[in-house]
Image (cartoon, rainbow, N blue to C red):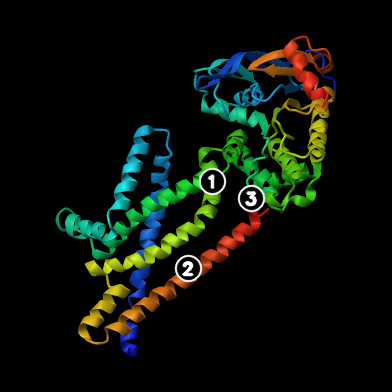
Amino acid sequence: MERTGEARLIVEVKGLGKSFGAHKVLDGVDFSMRAGEVVAVIGPSGSGKSTLLRCLNQLEQHDEGLIQICGIGMQAGLPVPRKDMNDLRRSAGMVFQSFNLFPHMTVLRNISLPQERVLGRSRAQADERSRALLERVGLAGKADQYPARCSGGQQQRIAIARALALDPRIMLFDEPTSALDPEIGLEVLAVMQELAEAGMSMIVVTHEMHFAETVSDRVILMAEGRILEEGPSAEVMRRPKTARAQQFLHAVLNR
Amino acid sequence: MTPENALLIAGGIWWTIIVTLGAFGLGAALGVPICAMHVSRSRALHVVAVVLIVILRSVPPIVWIFILYFGIGSGWLSIGPVPAAIVALGVITAANMAEIYRGALKSIHPGQWDASHALGLSTWSEFRDVMAPQIFRVTLPSATTYLIGLLKDSAIASTIGVMEITYLAGFLASKQFGASLQIFAFAGALYILISLPLAAVARIADARLRMKVAQ
């Protein structure tokens, strides 16, 4: 898919700040992305990557700055109207490190229930869509199982299907493979790569350097709550400018 | 133990069950808002819930029954012995169920809230579809233990004249001097008879639910 040209901005973040108590987790973060772009966010643990993602869909409320995502603007300190919040959650799908499937529902129910509750689809419509998505992530046979009977990699693919079922315009991935064996992680990354190739806008917080370099269009490297470097993947990862970024990349690329 | 006596005492089973289930139903329902207040972000609601729970749990059930039936019931509003027993045991149950719910709430992985919010589920759907079923599963064993305890506690309803098992046994024993041992032993056996199926049903339900979510 062609990603260049005059695509509109799907995310715009200006002066984003967030503190937990006295600890400033995000400090003056600015970035934007166009629809269809795939952005990888990398950096050492505790650099604020996950918090950035959680602010984007308001699982955390930011203290400073402005977030615009899918046409919804959120200024720090101002309450987000219910309608905007609903639109936001509908537009932004999220995938978590710990999968967070609902353990008491079958795989099919996990994917269908949000469609019924959030989009008002009938059970039949929802199930049809769920089965199509399970097929797409290679788990058609798992529909009637409970999540506990699925491997971690399978659970994460189901979680991706659950998020996609609401027809999001952007997908947020919060370290989707960090809880998985490297080998199992590959099956999740394959699904994500396919999604990227289909033109989905994606922000991926990850420690998978290979994925960041080969699949994403752009890499954002964060440390201590700030964006250290940002640019085309190969450039940031192979020719980092700052000493801190060089140190981090040297550590993770030479393992 | 004559068949007539046995039948008479067994006639109290219904009131025993009505008082027990009535109090449990009331408590299981009232426990939800009390638990919600306890975990609420509002400091005031939290304090109210804590005070309520301490008061309800510290005063003996029989004293609550007397307060309701002889205290409030005699002067301010008229309340029959059965409703008095159900309400008195019900509010105590509410305090205990609130604590049982709270324990279950803590056992739910925080990611469940994240997922519900990120998917855009409404607060009601989050409660009804995601949290309540999981809380129910976790509370089932402790709630059953409490229910069986409540079944035995319902005997104190006899003190205000509810014609349940213990009341009828006491009535008979006072009439037939010398037969007290058999009469009360029979009453005891009835309690065992009621609690056994309760425990069995709960154990089977628990095992089934566990099997579904087991790794």
Between the residue at mark 2 and the residue at mark 1, the CA separation in whole angstroms equals 25 Å
**Mark 2 / mark 1, whichever is N-terminal:** 1
Labels 3 and 2 touching (C-beta < 8 A) = no
Observer able to see residue A10: no
Q: Amino acid at mark 1?
A: Ser
Residue B37, image x, y percentages: 39, 40
Count numbered badges in the picture: 3
Which structural element holds mark 2? helix
SS at mark 1? helix
- For the residues labelled 3 and 1, the Cα–Cα distance comes to 17 Å
Q: Are marks 3 and 2 on the same chain?
A: no
Q: In the image, what residue occupies the spot 24% across and 87% down?
A: B178
Give the x, y percent position of residue B47: 34, 38
Residue B153 is left or right of residue A215, and the answer is left
| A31 to B172, vertically: above or below | above
- Is the residue marked by circle 2 packed among few (<14), some (14-19), or many (20+) residues within 10 Å? some
Q: Nearer the viewer, mark 3 or mark 1?
A: 1
Q: Residue at x 75, y 10 (%)?
A: A242
Determine the residue positioned at 72% across, 22% down: A41
Element under disc 3: loop
Find disc 1 in the rendering and name its residue: B107
Q: Residue furthest bottom?
A: B2
The answer to whether the residue labelled 2 contacts the one labelled 1, judged by CB atoms less than 8 Å apart, is no
The residue located at (41%, 52%) in the rendering is B97
Report the mark closest to the observer, 3 or 2. Answer: 2
Q: CA distance from mark 3 to mark 2?
A: 26 Å
| Quadrant, the C terminus of chain A | top right
Q: Which residue carries the number 3 mark?
A: A105
Q: How far across and down, in percent of the image, does residue B192 sit?
A: 42, 74
Residue B198 tag number: 2
Q: Is residue B31 left or right of residue B163?
A: right
Q: Amino acid at mark 2?
A: Leu
